[in-house]
């Protein structure tokens, strides 16, 4: 797969003089085309700052970001961002369809093409019939789906997501995670998603980049070998998921990456635990 995103030597400092505060420190990583990568890190470590540098919303103090080889200097046309706070990302005075079409206005597309793309994006997030409604008439989860549809409608080369499911209830969060995985696979999208939720990072992604406490550095780049078809119950119970989740948690608490022998031992333990739980559930069912 070709490289879609290339981040090299990226550092960012806020303030100046005595007040200088280094938030992101010499980060380097790539994301391949069609990959869904999650960045997970402790609260306040600099995740949003990193994402804003990648989006071209702020200029990094050092280093560079390239999108399909082009240096990012300002927000590129073929990049979309979904933020946590859906209530502030949608325009309340515009209908849902007009919100989704909004970024397409500067693309030189005909009105018919804008309509077609908006309807297709709304259908792909399971909201085919609400184009005429207004954001205030929708639940929080539906509003966030509209934000995702708006990002998809522009067919971005890279979709950035900053804690996109942090403001919805747990059940909606699971639904949105599954929706994101389905849409990402159907469209072959490249996604970089920031979260502080360890389970979410493992469940969603092909790769998890683990950041240290501030100033953020990459402490591990883990490949997630879970099957492409995932579901919220069996995947989260699987030995591999439990082992990866443990590995990310350990790294976030300052541990070193596990050796292969430690990973195997952890997977065996997790598998034994899962088998025990299953046997326990079955014995309760037969009582
Ligand atoms: N515009 C700014 N000016 C000065 N300091 C800032 C600015 N934005 C963020 N910071 C500081 O940079 C640090 C990292 O903030 P950032 O929002 O990037 O972290 P985060 O990992 O996304 O946090 P959280 O997990 O709480 O969302 C924090 O100490 C924050 O106070």
Image (spheres, helix red, strand yellow):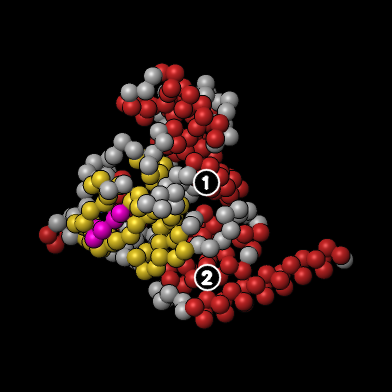
Identify the residue shown where x is 60% and y is 54%: 230
Distance between the alpha carbons at the discs numbered 2 and 1: 26 Å
Viewer-closest of 2 and 132: 2
Viewer-closest of 234 and 23: 234
Q: Where residue 77 sits: x, y (%)?
A: 31, 36
Q: Where residue 234 sits: x, y (%)?
A: 66, 59
Graded by Cα atoms within 10 Å as few (under 14), some (14 to 19) or many (20 or more), the crowding at tag 2 reads some
Please check the rendered image and state whether residue 227 is part of the magenta-colored stretch, yes or no.
Answer: no
Name the residue carrying label 2.
Answer: 246
Quadrant for residue 29, please give it.
bottom left
Residue 120 against residue 140 in the figure, above or below = above
Name the residue carrying label 1.
Answer: 185
- Closer to the observer: label 2 or label 1? 1
**SS majority, magenta:** strand
Identify the residue shown where x is 58% and y is 34%: 126
Where are the magenta residues, as a range? 6-10
Q: Image quadrant for the C terminus? A: bottom right
């Amino acid at each position: 797969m070709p490289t879609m995103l290339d981040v090299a030597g990226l550092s960012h400092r806020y303030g100046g003089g005595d007040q200088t505060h280094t938030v992101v420190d010499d980060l380097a990583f790539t994301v391949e085309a069609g990959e869904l990568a999650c960045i997970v890190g402790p609260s306040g470590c600099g995740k949003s700052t990193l994402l804003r540098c990648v989006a071209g919303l702020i200029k990094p103090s050092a280093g560079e970001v390239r999108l399909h080889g082009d240096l990012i200097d300002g927000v590129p046309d073929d990049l979309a961002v979904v933020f946590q706070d859906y209530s502030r990302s949608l325009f309340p005075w515009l209908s849902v369809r007009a919100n989704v079409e909004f970024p397409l206005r500067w693309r030189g597309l005909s009105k018919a093409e804008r309509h077609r793309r908006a309807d297709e994006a709304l259908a792909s997030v399971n909201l085919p019939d609400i184009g005429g409604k207004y954001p205030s008439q929708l639940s929080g989860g539906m509003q966030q789906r509209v934000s995702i549809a708006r990002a998809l409608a522009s067919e971005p080369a890279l979709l950035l997501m900053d804690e996109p499911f942090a403001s919805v209830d747990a059940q909606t969060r699971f639904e949105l995670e599954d929706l994101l995985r389905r849409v990402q696979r159907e469209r072959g999208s490249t996604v970089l998603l920031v979260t502080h939720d360890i389970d979410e990072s493992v469940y969603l992604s092909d790769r998890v980049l683990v950041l240290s406490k501030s100033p953020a550095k990459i402490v591990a780049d883990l490949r997630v070998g879970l099957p492409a078809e995932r579901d919220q119950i069996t995947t989260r119970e699987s030995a591999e998921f439990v082992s990866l989740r443990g590995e990310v948690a350990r790294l976030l608490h300052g541990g070193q990456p596990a050796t292969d022998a430690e990973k195997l031992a952890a997977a065996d333990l997790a598998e034994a635990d899962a088998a025990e739980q299953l046997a326990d559930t079955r014995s309760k069912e037969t009582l």
